[in-house]
Amino acid sequence: MKLFRIYCGQRPQDGCFNELDLERNGKTARRLAAQFFPLGHTVIEATGQWAHFNGTHTITEPTTVIEVLIDTGKASDAIYEMARAYKEAANQESVMVLTTEVNANFV
């Protein structure tokens, strides 16, 4: 079983944004997660940081992290489809997908 984390930064790649853009991108991440993972997922609101491409300063942005636990196989294709859909809809340079092998049990 794998745990996938999709990191959806909310600051558009062109750097031109306002609070409405950030709010819209957060809603877009949650809407896409519900669409691609209707059987269950976790939404974590976080703050992400990354070095600007030229290394002169650090960018801080609101980030929505979508966690999805999936048995391996075709179902994991939805992870990358959702990440690509968010990247396009939210004007992102990239969307990080983190994959971790886990043992999970429901009690």
Image (cartoon, helix red, strand yellow):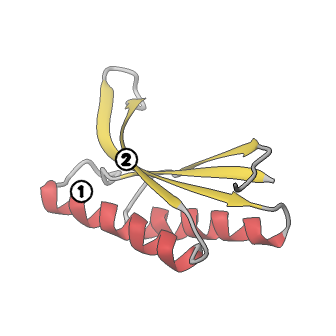
Question: Which residue occupies 42% across, 32% down?
Answer: 53
Mark 1 is surrounded, within 10 Å at the Cα level, by few (under 14), some (14 to 19) or many (20 or more) other residues, namely some
Q: Nearer the viewer, residue 102 or 58?
A: 102
Quadrant of the image occupied by residue 47: top left
Sequence-wise, the earlier of marks 1 and 2 is: 1
Query: Which is more toward the observer, 32 or 45?
Result: 45
Outermost residue to the front: 107
The image position of residue 59, as x and y in percent, is 31, 32
Residue at screen point 59% across, 73% down: 37
* Mark 1 in CB contact with mark 2 (< 8 angstroms): no
Residue sitting at 51 percent across and 79 percent down?
Answer: 35
* Amino acid type of the residue that numbered disc 1 sits on in the rendered structure: Leu
Return the residue nearer the eye: 98 or 59.
98
The residue type indicated by label 2 comes to: Thr
Helix, strand or loop at label 1? It is helix
In the image, residue 17 sits, relative to residue 60, either above or below, namely: below
**Location of residue 104 in the rendering, given as x and y in whole percent from the top left corner:** 75, 49
Does residue 44 appear to the left or right of 94 in the view shown? left
Mark 2 crowdedness (10 Å alpha carbons): few <14, some 14-19, many ≥20: many
In the picture of the structure, the residue carrying the numbered disc 1 is: 22
Q: Residue furthest right?
A: 73
Instruction: Give the CA distance from mark 1 to mark 2.
Output: 9 Å
Q: What is the secondary structure assignment of the residue under circle 2?
A: strand
* Residue 56, picture quadrant: top left
The quadrant the C terminus occupies is bottom right
Residue denoted by label 2:
63
Q: Is residue 24 above or below residue 99?
A: below
Residue 28 point in image, percent of width and height:
36, 69
